[in-house]
Amino acid sequence: MSPKPLYLPPDGRPRCAWCAAAPGDDAYLRYHDEEWGRPVADDFRLFEKLCLEGFQSGLSWRTILNKRDAFRAAFAGFDFHAVAKFGEADVQRLLADAGIVRHRGKIEAAIHNAARCVELVTTEGSLAAYLWRFEPPQNSVAHNLATSAPSEALSKDLKKRGWKFVGPTTMHALMQAMGLINDHQPGCHHWAEAQAAREAFIRPR
């Protein structure tokens, strides 16, 4: 697969091609520059990303990113212990919340997955420790893929545990965003920063 041209915004710093989807959107660029590809070990942030990737299905990440603060407020900061206790009244509250994506199936899946996450943490120690076990060897995953062998393995295992909206494409996007792989394009101004963060990162156990 031939590499996509880098995106060159007005600041002159080349970035991954996907940033071109939102020219002039400072929040989108900050997400790329400061978050995407940087390793994460916080369980609530990891659960948030699992949920938001599910909500993104059929939509753009830019749409979800612009609603992220509203999602955080609606879903108790993605504290899965709290979300697992949501009932039908909470579903109705969320369906009435114009700040988020009001899709009953996705809302119910997030609540369902919160309960599965509580179970997983009980057996595996933490969501972070579990997810980082699927980190591929350095440079073993080609750039610019929609899915990969590690994401397929993660998807398969989560589905066995009863999780929903965790297909291999969604899980590959999670791995890219949460730093399990450094998928910044070669030549992207932030590739080296993400790589340095990965090298300094202490993997959760």
Image (cartoon, rainbow, N blue to C red):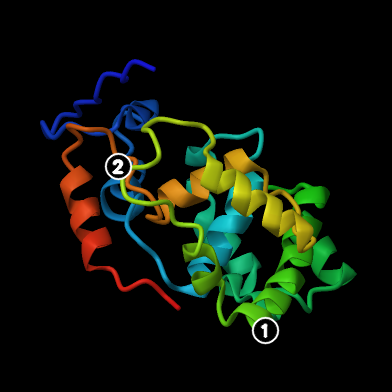
Label 2 Cα neighbours within 10 Å, binned few <14 / some 14-19 / many ≥20: many
Residue beneath label 1, please?
Answer: 122
Residue lying farthest to the top in this orientation: 2
- Between discs 1 and 2, the one toward the N terminus: 2
Q: Is residue 57 left or right of residue 46?
A: right
In the picture, which quadrant includes the N terminus? top left
Depth check, front residue: 84 or 117: 117
Residue beneath label 2, please?
Answer: 29
Image height of 142 relative to 204, above or below = above
Q: Residue at x 39, y 65 (%)?
A: 40
x then y, percent, for residue 158: 69, 58
Which amino acid, mark 1? Thr
Q: Is residue 141 left or right of residue 115?
A: left
Image height of 172 relative to 196, above or below = above
In the picture, which quadrant includes the C terminus? bottom left
Which amino acid, mark 2? Leu
Q: Quadrant of residue 28?
A: top left
